Image: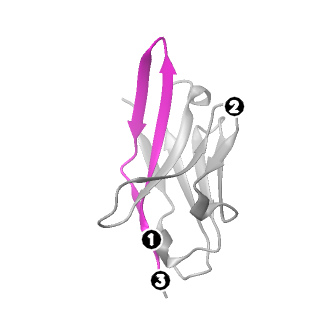
Amino acid sequence: QVQLVESGGGLVQPGGSLRLSCAASVNIFRLYDMLWYRQAPGNQRELVAVIYNSGNTNYTDSVKGRFTISRDNAKSTVYLQMNRMKPEDTAVYYCNAVRITNFIKYNYWGQGTQVTVSS
């Protein structure tokens, strides 16, 4: 059974940092594109960052220059380093693993981890 387990969430002051981790039990982790989403109360789920199986990355505009997504294929883990955090970063953060092969889409989600930015 595939599992994605996020960790590292919590309470941080504005301007502070947090590092989220997502450990995946998928086969051939290195072939998956890994994504971080977030969802604030009353809002739709928002794509924050993606790291493709190639290692290329992309970010939503609101986090560019502050957040960094990375992966360790040997540990089957993806990370989201969040710096210079703002109250508007407050949300539940979700890890997502996606792979498309032979016209089959493999799509897995973690349970989410709460991030609160507040003084």
Q: Secondary structure at mark 2?
A: loop
Which residue, given by chain and number where applicable, does mark 2 sit on? Answer: 54
Which residue, given by chain and number where applicable, does mark 3 sit on? Answer: 118
| Amino acid at pointer 2 | Ser
Magenta stretch: includes residue 53 = no
Residue 79, relative to residue 77: is it above or below?
A: below
Which residue, given by chain and number where applicable, does mark 1 sit on? Answer: 90
Question: Where does the magenta region start and end?
Answer: 91-117
At x 35%, y 56%, the residue is 44
- Alpha carbon of mark 1 to alpha carbon of mark 3: how far? 8 Å
Q: Is residue 7 left or right of residue 68?
A: left
Residue 88, relative to residue 71: is it above or below?
A: below
- Alpha carbon of mark 2 to alpha carbon of mark 3: how far? 36 Å
Q: Is residue 35 left or right of residue 83?
A: left
Q: Is residue 26 visible?
A: no
- Which numbered disc flags the more N-terminal residue, 1 or 3? 1
At x 62%, y 35%, the residue is 52
| Amino acid at pointer 1 | Thr
Tell me residue 85's x, y (percent): 58, 74
